[in-house]
Image (cartoon, rainbow, N blue to C red):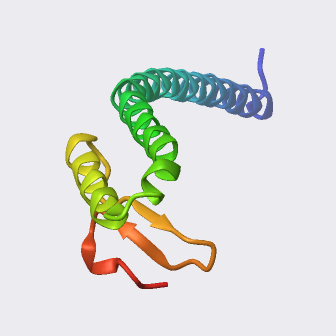
Amino acid sequence: MFTRRQFFFAEWFFVLMALLALGGYLGFSAYQDYQRTERDELARLAQQASIVEHNLVPQVEAANQALLSLIEDLPRWQQEKDFRERINRRLEVLTDIVPGLRTLLVVDARGEIVASSNRKVIGSL
């Protein structure tokens, strides 16, 4: 029937096939885990991005409106005597009202801070 040598090769062939099947199964299983993890993490990242957008967009829009109102009022205020006091007070109010804003500055052409919601920095470069 089978010689000893043929039996030896047949045994090793079946062992190799079993190891190959096991390795294929483990590789396929690991790849499925990788795909599932990637899908879950992408969904979590999309959800977090949505939350950040939901919270951040209104803050940025509010800051933009605050800056636009300052730009609109600044030329008129510069004509008035108490310009610096009025603009400093307005900047303080805006930073108190708009969430996420800490300090607003008005800087002249030389880079000197002429008005600020933080009065300590006025006059610095």
Residue 76 placement, left or right of 2: left
Q: How many marks?
A: 0
Is 83 in front, or is 90? Answer: 83
* Residue at the far top in the pictured view: 1
Left or right: 6 with respect to 15? right
Query: Residue at the location (48% across, 48% down)?
Result: 76
Rendered residue at 60%/30% (across/down) = 23
Vertical comparison of 113 with 96: above or below: below
Furthest residue toward bottom: 124
Residue 70: image location, x then y, percent: 44, 46
Q: Nearer the viewer, residue 1 or 47?
A: 47
Q: Quadrant of residue 14?
A: top right
Residue at 42% x, 23% y is 50
Q: Nearer the viewer, residue 37 or 55?
A: 55
The location of residue 104, given as percent across then percent down, is 38, 59
User: Where is residue 119 shown, x and y percent of the image?
Assistant: 26, 73
In this rendering, the answer to whether 8 lies above or below 107 is: above
Q: Quadrant of the N terminus?
A: top right
Percent coordinates x, y for residue 97 in the rendering: 22, 41
